[in-house]
Image (cartoon, rainbow, N blue to C red):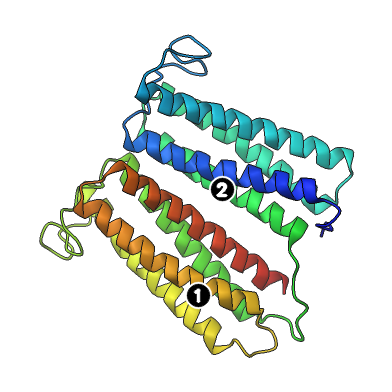
């Protein structure tokens, strides 16, 4: 772990990079919600220009590209800094994993335009964006996590629970991405019923939306049960007290996310609610990764 007091610049730099990446993902959701994904019909230029003429939708996509470029530059600078300062091998592995994911993400960003918003490409673009953010967060935890030294090691069974909940949350984000990229957000009218039924079908766009809802319910149930498990064992010598706090916030955010998801449907997918829904998904993932890191490192 890096001494945060002597590496204030690095800590702030990495924080800024993480915030920029979070904004980039949210802005990507705004581009999608505003139907601005093809407002720049070519790539990497926009209408054959580095700086296109002003138009609201064009600039949603143009600013998204500019911010992506800044994130890429900052990440490469960070990797170079790590090598110059000869950081530990585990940190080098993490930053180069991030670089690899970033390069793949850049390719999918271009393909998103060139393949005319093909749903599989756009979904992959979202997945790699979330994965890149996760890598940066993991690197931050490696460098600046101040782990409490506990009297006992965390049980392996608790590790399994941590990975299971993280996996369920990741699958839910992917399903949400598929609903968005297939324009299935309004395939189900109403909430909690879908077109007046609980499960009208599991096929087609309606089925995709239903799967997203029901996996979301299962994920929420898993997170609530996880929080209950944490509180039940909060006095155990192996339980990190920070996990208790984070676990509580995880359940609160899940409740908020369900409300936002319902609002998204009931108000016919307003762009601002769609962006909040995506931003909350990224926040939930980041918080779960924090809990996972604390749990397996305790």
Q: Is residue 36 left or right of residue 194?
A: right
The residue under the point 63% across, 90% down is 235
Label ID, residue 131: 2
Q: Earlier in the sequence, mark 2 or mark 1?
A: 2
**Residue 95 percent coordinates (x, y):** 72, 44
Using the numbered discs, state the Cα–Cα distance from disc 2 to disc 1 in whole angstroms: 24 Å
**Residue 174 percent coordinates (x, y):** 42, 51
**Residue 83 percent coordinates (x, y):** 85, 39
Which of the image's four quarters has the N terminus?
bottom right
Residue 191 position (above or below residue 47) = below
Residue 106 in view of the camera: no
Residue, far left: 196
What residue did someone put label 1 on? 248
Q: State the SS at label 2.
A: helix
- Label 2 with label 1: CB-CB less than 8 Å: no
Q: In this view, does 45 lie to the left or right of 157?
A: left
Residue 44 position (above or below residue 188) = above
Q: Is residue 255 left or right of residue 97?
A: left
The residue under the point 66% across, 38% down is 100
Q: In this view, does 29 lie to the left or right of 64?
A: left
Please tell me how crowded label 1 is: few (under 14), some (14-19), or many (20+) other residues with Cα within 10 Å: some
The residue under the point 50% across, 56% down is 283
* Quadrant hosting residue 200: bottom left
* Quadrant hosting residue 28: top left
């Amino acid at each position: 772990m890096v001494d945060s007091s002597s590496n204030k610049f690095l800590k702030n730099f990495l924080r800024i990079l993480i915030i920029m990446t979070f904004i980039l993902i949210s802005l990507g959701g705004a581009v999608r919600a505003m139907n601005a994904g093809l407002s720049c019909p070519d790539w990497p230029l926009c209408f054959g220009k580095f700086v296109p003429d002003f138009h609201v939708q064009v600039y949603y996509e143009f600013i998204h590209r500019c911010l992506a470029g800044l994130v890429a530059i900052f990440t490469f600078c960070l990797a170079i800094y790590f090598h110059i300062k000869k950081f530990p091998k585990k940190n080098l592995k993490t930053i180069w994993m991030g670089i690899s994911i970033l390069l793949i993400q850049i390719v999918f960003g271009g393909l998103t335009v060139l393949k005319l918003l093909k749903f599989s490409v756009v979904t992959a673009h979202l997945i790699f964006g979330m994965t890149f953010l996760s890598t940066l967060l993991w690197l931050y935890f490696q460098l600046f996590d101040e782990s409490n030294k506990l009297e006992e090691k965390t049980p392996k069974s608790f590790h399994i629970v941590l990975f299971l909940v993280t996996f369920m949350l990741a699958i839910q984000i992917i399903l949400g991405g598929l609903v968005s990229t297939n324009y299935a957000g309004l395939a189900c009218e109403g909430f909690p019923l879908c077109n007046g039924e609980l499960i009208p079908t599991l096929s087609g766009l309606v089925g995709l939306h239903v799967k997203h809802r029901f996996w979301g319910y299962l994920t929420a149930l898993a997170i609530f049960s996880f929080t209950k498990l944490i509180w039940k064992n909060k006095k155990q010598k192996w339980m990190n007290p920070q996990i208790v706090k984070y676990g509580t916030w995880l359940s609160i955010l899940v409740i908020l996310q369900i409300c936002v998801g319902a609002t998204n449907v009931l108000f016919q997918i307003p762009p601002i609610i769609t962006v909040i829904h995506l931003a909350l998904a990224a926040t939930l993932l980041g918080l779960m990764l924090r809990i996972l890191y604390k749990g397996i490192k305790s």
